[in-house]
Image: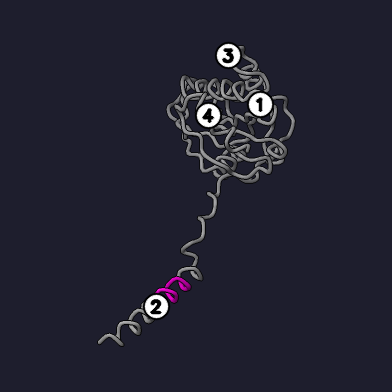
Amino acid sequence: MPRRIPILIAACVVGLIFLGAVAWKTGVFDRPAPAAVGGPFQLVDQHGKPADESLLNGKWSVVFFGFTYCPDVCPTTLQALAAAQQQLGPKADKLQVVFISLDPARDTPAQLNTYLGSEIFRKGIIGLTGTPEQVAAAAKAYRVYFKKNGEGADYLVDHSTAAYLMDPKGRFDRVIPFGVSPEEIARQISDAMR
């Protein structure tokens, strides 16, 4: 009986090593791949100049989708992002806020320029719009839900409320949920910039 115990222990150790090797080989211990958020887009900015995904290169970017006639989520989010950017201090110059309209019928470059030039927003927010097809392609690349809701001139656009932090190479870093305080947004961005 006592001679069997070392053999049993050795068999268990060999079995555990084998199971560990199989798990390692099949990727059980691998980190999950980053979410597939972001990608190519062809839009125009609030000055009518063409803009694509290369706009995100060289700076950290917070990308937020909305529309200028949005009564609540969009202005609240843009104000929170502006306040967070201000709280970054010297790091603020390494961040840009990009607002992509989901309402190309009303949000022309001129409308975006007027809206983003308002005193309630921090100067320097980049506004983008395009054809309905271009906007839909950009929204799809960022996994953004949107749908026109209502008829006539006063319709709304239902849409996702999160913003996306992209690194200086245009790669997705993290989601910034709606309703997070400017202090928390600034903390998350500052942590990502390290």
Q: Which residue is nearer to you in this view: 100 or 86?
A: 86
Q: Do the residues bearing badges 2 and 1 touch, measured as CB atoms within 8 Å?
A: no
Q: Residue at x 65, y 24 (%)?
A: 125
The nearer-to-camera label among 3 and 1 is: 1
* Distance between mark 4 and mark 1 Cα atoms: 12 Å
Residue 15 is tagged as: 2
* Distance between mark 4 and mark 3 Cα atoms: 18 Å
The nearer-to-camera label among 2 and 1 is: 2
Residue highlighted by disc 4: 185
* Distance between mark 2 and mark 4 Cα atoms: 48 Å
Q: Please tell me whether residue 11 is drawn above or below residue 77 in the rendered image.
A: below
Residue highlighted by disc 1: 92
Circle 3 residues within 10 Å: few <14, some 14–19, many ≥20: few
Is residue 169 covered in magenta? no
Q: Regarding mark 3 in the picture, which secondary structure is present there?
A: loop
The span picked out in magenta is: 16-22
Between disc 3 and disc 1, whose residue precedes? 1
Judge left or right: residue 6 versus residue 82.
left
Relative image position of residue 132 (x, y in whole percent): 59, 36
Q: Residue at x 30, y 86 (%)?
A: 4
The nearer-to-camera label among 4 and 3 is: 4
Circle 1 residues within 10 Å: few <14, some 14–19, many ≥20: some
Residue highlighted by disc 3: 120
Q: Please tell me whether residue 194 is drawn above or below residue 28 in the rendered image.
A: above
* Distance between mark 3 and mark 1 Cα atoms: 18 Å
Question: For residue 131, what is the image quadrant?
Answer: top right
Q: Amino acid at mark 4?
A: Ile
Relative image position of residue 24 (x, y in whole percent): 49, 68
Q: Amino acid at mark 3?
A: Ile
Q: Regarding mark 2 in the picture, which secondary structure is present there?
A: helix
Residue 193 is tagged as: none
Most extreme residue toward the left, as rendered? 1
